[in-house]
Amino acid sequence: MAKHVLLNNIAHKDLKIITQYSARFGDNLGSTLTFPTEFGDIQREYPILFRKESANGKFQSVVLLGFKPDENLFLDEFRGWQADYIPAVIERGPFLIGFQDQRVDGGSERAPVVHVDLDNPRVSEIEGKAVFLEHGGISPYLDRINQLLLRIYEGMQISDAMFDAFLALDLLEPVTLEIQINEREQYCLQGNYTISASKLAALGDKDIAHLHRSGFLRCAYLAMESLGNIQRLIQLKNTRT
């Protein structure tokens, strides 16, 4: 069971995090969440797809890592994660964004703060990267985590607006991925969506300008271009069969 607590440099002065990637840490995932704020890095190495959340029907962005739920083709148990960029929700490890009431100009507001899951198997006081420096300062590792959490937080803030814009212009279309590895092994991945290239190309100048000003036109193109990375997944799969 997760044990989320507010991170602080007194209670967690000796906290260390194991940063290697392995199935024993839950990294054997066939897909994981991603956010518009990291599409530029993600699309260079991974396919970006869209899926509906079963609970509320909202769209979310996902990174495809393998063709089975527990298959991460970028994960090598001996060499670690085999890609230059690691999705932010993976690299953040046991850290997450929480919220705390803070006094601002005589009132209060919910502000994002850093929490840590103390029951996460990466958490240690013996091995790993130190979270805080000897005298309580933020370590370079925690500084990196703060950057990742900010990227996730900002991505969460604009994700719904991006999908609202795509839906308003009818740009999302379902896509079925039929993957042929060899004569004996093939996969059919359903329930995913992508950007309709034909509908995007048919948009008028006003709609294109609106998407461009919002930054979502770039997101649409990055998502479409990322699908070329499915071939890389097939190549990675072939090296393991």
Image (cartoon, rainbow, N blue to C red):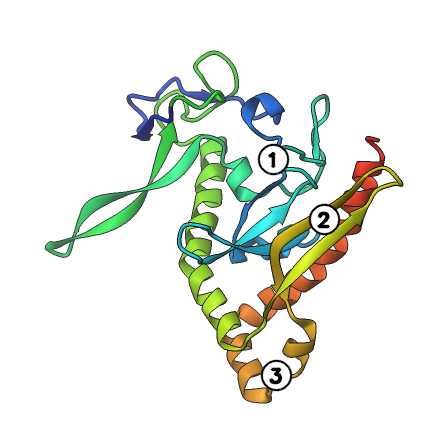
Identified at 43% across, 66% down, the residue is: 161
Three-letter residue code for mark 1: Leu
Q: Nearer the viewer, residue 147 or 20?
A: 20
Snapshot quadrant of residue 222: bottom right
Which residue is tagged 1?
29
- First in sequence, mark 3 or 1: give its number: 1
Of label 1 and label 2, which has the lower sequence position? Answer: 1
Q: CA distance from mark 1 to mark 2?
A: 17 Å
Q: Are marks 3 and 1 in contact (CB under 8 Å)?
A: no
Amino acid type for the residue under numbered disc 2? Cys
Q: Is residue 227 above or below residue 130?
A: below
Mark toward the viewer: 1 or 2: 2
Residue at the (19%, 45%) spot, across then down: 101
Residue at horizontal 72 percent and vertical 48 percent from the top: 188
Residue count near mark 2 (Cα–Cα under 10 Å), binned few <14, some 14–19, many ≥20: few
Residue projecting furthest to the top: 126
Q: Nearer the viewer, residue 182 or 47?
A: 182
Q: Tell me the tag on residue 203.
A: 3
Question: Could you tell me the amino acid type at mark 3?
Answer: Leu
Disc nearer the start of the sequence (2/3): 2
Instruction: Please provide percent x and percent y for residue 98.
Output: 32, 41
Q: Residues within 10 Å of mark 3 (few under 14, many from 20)?
A: few
Q: Residue at x 65, y 71 (%)?
A: 196
Give the number of the disc on residue 189.
none
Residue at image mark 2: 188
